Image: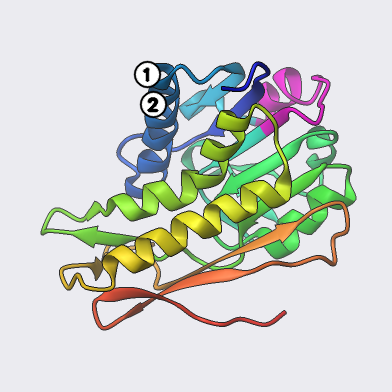
Amino acid sequence: MADSCIDLLFIRPGPEEDWIAGKLSQYVDDLLEECAQNGVRYKVVEDLKYENANVASVSERIGGAQGSDRSVVGLFGHGKDAVFFGFEGDVLLDADNAKMLEGFHVYAVTCANASDFGQLLVSEGALSYVGYLEYFLIPKVGDECEPHDCWRDIVLGGLRQALSAGSYGVFEVYSAIQAEYSRWMERLSSETELEVAEEPGVYDLASLGLLADDPTLWNLFWLSDNQGRLEKLPISS
């Protein structure tokens, strides 16, 4: 087990009544509980949750912090284009304040902003960015629109790897997500009960793009529903 540990700074605006962002926030709690149970060391430097995920708090508590190669800002919530949204849909991070994440790795579980937002953060000094290019596909089970465990495991796969290793290597993180994706695809290939959630704001296409120090570097995958199961599809940059 790693002697060193990762410094975590979470921004997770979604209230529980927000079906998507509320689940993502819960996944953060699940991950930290899992680490504690398994003896995995970590340090939560900041955790801006719900109404505390606002511009003033981010500026004061993260913007003034000193990032390092062991510091990861986790964004869990709604995004689009070059914007990450805060509590109740207010703009939280955009071109005006992206430099606040200079010196940090950014692990973003948010829709449709890896291309614009990710490149913006890297250009403003973020050490790396892992995020999503398109809107999430959120697979569900049953009639209660409960997300399938595969979604949680895939979006958390990279952080799990980094926390277990005690270091944040962006290619290792990306590879861990890919491995978790492949594991679930193999497992789900014989299942038929998986459906795409029909809730408002839940979309049928998702992809992950990676931006490291070189913002022209891309490694992509996406998820798409295909007759009741998830399937990996080719994508080109």
Percent of width and height locating residue 216 = 85, 67
Residue 86 seen by the camera = no
Residue 121 lies, in percent from the top left, at 80, 48
Could you tell me if the residues under marks 2 and 1 are in contact, i.e. CB atoms within 8 Å?
yes
Which quarter of the figure has residue 162?
Answer: top right
Q: Is residue 180 above or below residue 90?
A: below
Magenta region includes residue 56: yes
Does 229 sit left or right of 157 as displayed?
left
Residue 37 numbered tag: 1
Q: Residue furthest front?
A: 1
Q: Residues within 10 Å of mark 1 (few under 14, many from 20)?
A: few
Secondary structure under tag 1 reads helix
Q: Secondary structure at mark 2?
A: helix
From this view, report whether residue 191 is shown above or below residue 181: below
Query: Based on the displayed image, in which of its 4 quarters is residue 85 positioned?
Result: top right
Residue 229: % across, % down = 28, 74
Does the magenta run of residues contain 52?
A: no
Q: Which residues are magenta?
A: 55-72
Measure how far apart labels 2 and 1 are at the Cα level: 5 Å
Residue lying at 62% horizontally and 31% vertically, measured from the top left: 165
Q: Which one is in front, 33 or 63?
A: 33
Relative vertical location of residue 30 with respect to residue 136 in this rendering, above or below: above
**Mark 2 packing: few (<14 Cα in 10 Å), some, or many (20+)?**
few
Q: Say which residue appears at 69% left-offset and 67% top-offset.
A: 219
Find disc 2 in the rendering and name its residue. 34
Q: Nearer the viewer, residue 215 or 200?
A: 215
Observer able to see residue 28: yes
Mark 1: which amino acid? Answer: Gln
Quarter the C terminus occupies: bottom right
